[in-house]
Amino acid sequence: MPLKSRLAVATTLAVLLVACSPAPEAATPAAAQPAPAQPVAAKSLASTLGAIEVQQIAAGLDHPWSVALLPEGGFLVTERSGQLRHVGADGAISAPYTGVPAVFAEGQGGLLDVVLAPDFASSKRIFLSYAEAGDKGLAGTAVATAILGDGALTEVKRIYQQLPKLDGEAHFGSRLAFDGQGHIFISQGERNHRPTSQELDKLQGKLVRLNLDGSVPQDNPFVGQANARPEIWSYGHRNMQGLAFDPRTGTLWESEHGPRGGDELNHPQPGKNYGWPIITYGINYSGLPIPEAQGQVKEGMEQPFHYWAKSPGLSGMAFYTGHADSPWNNSLFLGSLAESNLIRLSLDGDKIVGEERLLSENSERVRDVRVAADGAIYVLTDEDNGKLLRIHPPKAPAAPAAPAAPSAPAAPAPAQGQP
């Protein structure tokens, strides 16, 4: 065959082979792939007890609200818009889990707290708090349990809902805490309907205590009382966004937003009234007094354990204990939204003996804080580009060098003329 003809045949065969080859597989949509890790160099920042190291673990989160530390080293993170995501120890962010309950993602509402069940190692069960929609635009706080699977939640069951549902987009709370005795505590807000905090037939503005299956413990303070909800543990609260048990004593600590001033720390006791809105150390955002307020003290109402005259906008809360070699041992950490920093309170027993502000250089709202078993502190920033940060505390000061042992006195020099 002439050379020219052979070339024509070869070209034709090549074209046919390309045309008949299978098309490459379509790329997996970006939304279904974990976001790549974003390594960022650690920053050294000052604190009153020495330099701390702050490392960005992940970024690009949509107003993250809560972080739970997983046993294998990763994290669960809620985004207020309704997504639950896994963040790897390397910072890789997963696609949203499926099966998350529908949330009322308006204003301050959305997907809120996430905590691991006390028996998570065997059950893989988690608890979620969230704002839940009702009829005609109403909403309220709710809590559900679910089994954490590979990218999906199963066996989702709502165990609590705040009733009645009310209008508005503010003051849902909500944090969750276990007492180690088979109960879960649920903090909430009064939904910006102030009088409800004092009305025992409503669940707004109440700290709630339930059994882990959502049933009511029979030793709750209002069980059997007419016109009172049996779920209630304490009342007269405004908007509780911090809740934690002190590992040293088992005391429950709760933090709540004041209006303009008057943010509080409380040790909520069963059946006690914490005063909102009848007593408060804050004023309205308009600068005028709270309409229902009757002062700062009233018989039968509890005083806050501690309060701030200027609101830091308190959010997540975590104790730092059991690390005797750390300068931060026996501290309480609180997120600050209004002042965009992390508050550290030094504790002597239950007494607050010092306060410092950390991460002020970041100028980002701190929504949640958790302490890992190894002493590292994890913080979420509540921003469009929300971040998960790890903080390494300052190092313990080096022990002073032991004084040198005194040397033996030198023998006297021999006198002149002696041998």
Image (cartoon, grey):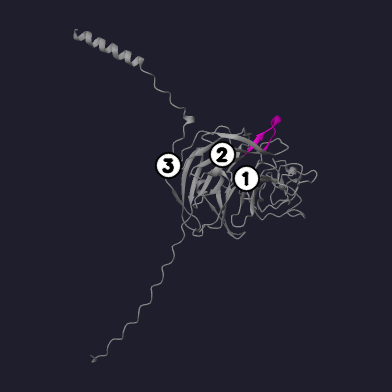
Determine whether, in the image, residue 24 is placed left or right of residue 205.
Answer: left
The residue lying furthest to the left in this view is 2
- The C terminus, quarter of image: bottom left
Q: Which of the numbered marks, if any, corresponds to residue 176? A: 1
Residue 287, given in percent of the width and then of the height, sits at 69, 46
Label 2: few (<14), some (14–19) or many (≥20) C-alpha neighbours in 10 Å: many
- Residue occupied by mark 3: 39
Secondary structure of the residue carrying tag 2 is: strand
Q: Is residue 381 visible?
A: no
Q: Is residue 256 above or below residue 29?
A: below
Q: Amino acid at mark 3?
A: Pro
Label 1: few (<14), some (14–19) or many (≥20) C-alpha neighbours in 10 Å: many
The residue lying toward the viewer, choosing from 265 and 151, is 151
Q: Would you identify the image quadrant in which residue 381 lies? A: top right
Q: Amino acid at mark 2?
A: Thr
The verdict on residue 80 being magenta is no
Residue 17, given in percent of the width and then of the height, sits at 32, 15
Compare marks 3 and 2 and give the one earlier in the sequence: 3
Residue 418, given in percent of the width and then of the height, sits at 24, 91
- Residue occupied by mark 2: 78
